[in-house]
Structure formats: structure tokens, C-alpha cells
Image (tube, rainbow, N blue to C red):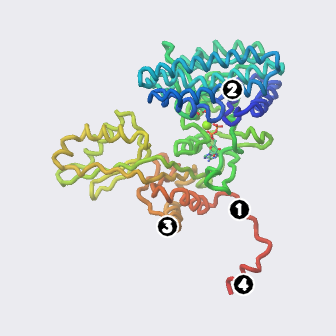
Amino acid sequence: MKFGGTSVGSADRMRVAARLAADERRKRPVAVVVSAMSKITDLLLDTMRHAEAGDLSGMEANLDKLRTRHVDVCLALLPESRQAAVMAKIHGLVDEFERIARGMAMLGERPPRSVDEAVAIGERLSALLVSEYLNAEGTPAAAINAREVVVTDAVFGNASPLMEATREKARSHLLPLLGQGSMPIITGFNGATADGRPTTLGRGGSDFSASILAAALDAAELWIWTDVDGIMSADPRLVPDAEVLQEITYAEAAELAYAGAKVLHPRTLAPLAEKKIPVWSKNSFAPEKPGTKIVPSIAAASGTRAVASMKNVALVSLEPASAELNGVQVMARALDAVARANVEVLLLSSSSYRQNFCFLVRQEELEQTVAALEAALALELAHHYLKPIHVDQDVGLLTAVGEGMQGKPGLAGRIFMAISRVQVNVIAIAQGSSELTIAVVVRRDGLEESVRAVHAECGLGMRPPVPVFTFPMARRRE
Ligand code: ADP
Ligand code: ASP
Ligand code: MG
């Protein structure tokens, strides 16, 4: 079971999470992965930015907030007899964080590996509190730092697991605990290289931690507890009538996550799909609801299942200025440069007539993208064989996802019509090579409206109730 930030966001939420895990444990062994309490990871990252900038008072104000939030939960959650001991551990962890942050203030720098070591303290604090509460309630539990069990490469801030090594460590640490009837409460989000340097798996990475461990332990099921009723046909914050999907395939869920649906970290499903471990996405605020089951396949693929969007993206365009330049060669070299800069291309679109092409990247990767292109194409740019690199940051990405989409003639056309009806310009399009997606780049300020329009056009969402009182409608028509 994995509990997200809001599901462990307060003493009350930790009580509920602990009860959900303890109830299941009466039936079978349970390992738990926890996120940091909601907003704590942002607070830790912000504290380190203050430190790097030499803003000590900003840094200290954040440290106070960090201590207070966890001390308050400790007081509200635990019996008096345990409070002093746990309080000392909380202060110990916050002191550890403070030492790293002060080091950054002194250096005027935030080395990525120190950031990873420090930011994992959010999860270590929540794992401590949840495990202490379970023990106090009579369910044996042990807080585990994922540094001890998740082995990764050395890409700080966005590490990938080394599954064989992880399997070995996770099994040797966790199976004996489970065998003794103790529930491991493991920190989400972090890990360490084989030689012990701390790493993290990228923002929202606790989902990924849970799937890595579920695969390593050959779990029967993975339950991801969050703050919505499951995976929905769209982000309910954007589309009020979004519906919960009862079932969704690994492929659909993975495409949705990559397309920006925050409900799952994009890499969550990879370790599970191979072993066909079923995943449930469930609401810890309404555990009685069925949630969404993620499964290998669904009998009747039914066209578009969901719409996702991403707003912090940028469209980069390249166009030859002279016919002598071979557009395909430019594209190959540009993409090679971008790949070597470790930038993910979210969408690619080209025109064979003008030999131009454009691709979409995350805004946070834009600077390194442009630098890589400028270096790789320096001569062509200097001699004006290529037009200057054009960057458009005023765009957003909309993606429709569904296994049955490829068999639906005219679907792309209907999606464009729906977007044009709400007067939003389509800037670029791509049918995903997996044929599970149709992706559209639109003007940023029309993105949310487009999501609602496409969602409705594809017949998704809860139908509005049939109006009982129709008389005024009839009059208007007269
Ligand atoms: P957690 O802290 O539990 O990991 P997140 O905030 O990371 O939770 O993810 C849950 C949020 O994802 C929801 O509150 C919802 O706003 C958002 N979301 C975006 N797209 C979807 C979708 N298709 N289905 C469900 N939730 C979605
Ligand atoms: N706490 C981490 C984050 O906020 C990981 C997670 O919650 O999934 O990014
Ligand atoms: Mg999340």
C-alpha cells in the first residue's frame, strides 16, 4: 500500500492510513510506502533555495514550519508516553536537514546529491510518525529508509531503479520483517546508488517507489491510496463532471501519466506490467468506494477513455532557410543533441514540404534543449542555413488516451472540431506511435477549455441529469 501526501497530511489522516493498512494486515502481510506529509517536499525544496541564495531568515522561518508541523502531529497522534522519544527523533531529523541546508548557505550552492539526501527527510518524518502510531495501537511496524532497499543509478533528482540489486536488498530486508508479522513503513521517493549515495526518483516518485517494491517483493496487489476516487476520465480539478474509470489497462494508465495526469507518477507501471501485478487506485478519504483497477487488458476496448493535459511545456521549431539543407538530417542531428542533453521529447511533428519540424519539451528542460541545439547546429545557424531557433512557451499539451482509439475513424477530426468550437487554435498534432493517444498542442490560455470540450465530445463524464422542468427551454425556442 502506498499513501500519498494528503493521505498522511495530518494526525487524522495518519490514523485513517494506519487503520486501512492494519485492517488489511489481518488478512495478509502488508508493506507500506509513505509520501512526505502534503506540501512538505515543496517546503524542503524552498528552504534549500533560500539557503543557496544566502537568505538565512527565509531558511529559518521554513525550518520552524517544518518542526512545528511534525511536532504538532506527534502531539495529536501519539500517546503521551511515546511523545518525548518521538519528538527527539523528529528534532534529530530536522537537525540533519538543517545541517545540509546550512552547508548550502555557506557554499552558495545546491549540489544535486545533497538535495536528494535532504529532501528525503520529508518521507523519513512521515514514516517515523506512521510507524510509531501503528506500534502504539498494537500493530508491530518498523520505519525503513528506502536508501536501504531501493538501489538506483546516480541520476540525482530523477534516478532509475536497478531492479536486480533492489530485489535482492528489498527481499533480504523486508521479507524477514513481514515474516515476523511486522509491517515495514518505507519512505517513498528516495533510494541510493549501489555505493550508498542518496538519490530520489523525481517529483511524485512515491508511486514509483511503491511499484518498484511491489515488483521486488512479488506482491499480490498494489494499492495506491490518494485523494480522489481513482483514475478519472480527466483531472476533476479541470473537469467537474469527470468520471471514475472502473478499469483501465497498464498501457492506458501509463500513457495518461506520461501525458500529465498527476494521479500516477509516469514510471509507476513499468515494473508491474511485466509481472502483471494488479494495481488499485483508491481514495483514502472514501475507502468504501471501489476505486480504479489497473489491469493487463480490457475485453471491450471502447475508444477514448480519458483526457490529460500539461501546461508547463514549450514548443521548439527549426526550419531550414535554404533548400540545400536536408531537413531530415537537421532533424536527426537536432534530436540526437536533445537526447544527449537528457531532455524528453513529448511530441514531434514535421512538414515534408517546408522541411521544418517542431517538438515539445517541458519548460524546465527548455534552457538545456536550446543550448544543446545551438551547440549541435552552430555552423548552420551562424551561416543562416537555418532560421533562428523559434521557441513558443505560450502553449499547452492535450492528450486523449484510449486503447480502442485507433479503430475509431474520424476521431481526430472530432477532437479538432471540439477544440475549434471553443475558439482555440491547434498549433501542432501527433498521433502517438503507440496508437493509444492523440496529442494536440494548443494555445496555453485555451488549454483547460479544450480539455473540457474534448472530454464532452468523446462522450466522457457523468451525463447531466435530465432536466425535470423544461418549460423555459421550450419558451426560449419560440
Ligand atoms: P498523492 O499525493 O496521493 O500522490 P497527487 O496529488 O500526486 O496525489 O495526485 C492526485 C491528484 O491527481 C488528484 O487530486 C487530481 O487532481 C489529479 N489528477 C490529474 N489527473 C487525474 C485523473 N485523470 N484522474 C484522477 N486524478 C487526476
Ligand atoms: N514527496 C514527494 C513529492 O512531493 C514524492 C511523492 O509524494 O510522491 O514529490
Ligand atoms: Mg502523487
Q: Position of residue 26 (x, y in %)?
A: 83, 24
Task: Give the image quadrant in which the ligand numbered 3 is located.
Answer: top right
Most distant residue in the bottom direction: 478
Work out whether residue 330 can be spotted: yes
- What amino acid is at disc 1? Arg
Residue tagged 3: 423
Vertical position of residue 121 compared to residue 402: above or below? above
Residue at x 63% of width, y 33% of height? 276
- Identify the element where label 4 is drawn: helix
- Give the mark nearest the N terminus, 1 or 3: 3
Q: CA distance from mark 1 to mark 2?
A: 43 Å
Most distant residue in the front direction: 57
| Depth check, front residue: 138 or 124 | 124
Residue tagged 2: 70
Q: How many marks?
A: 4
- What amino acid is at disc 4? Arg
Q: Quadrant of residue 330?
A: top left
Residue tagged 1: 463
Residue tagged 4: 475
Q: Quadrant of residue 43?
A: top right
| Label 2 CB sits under 8 Å from any ligand 2 atom | no
Q: CA distance from mark 2 to mark 4?
A: 60 Å
- Identify the element where label 2 is drawn: helix
| Depth check, front residue: 346 or 130 | 130
- Give the mark nearest the N terminus, 3 or 2: 2
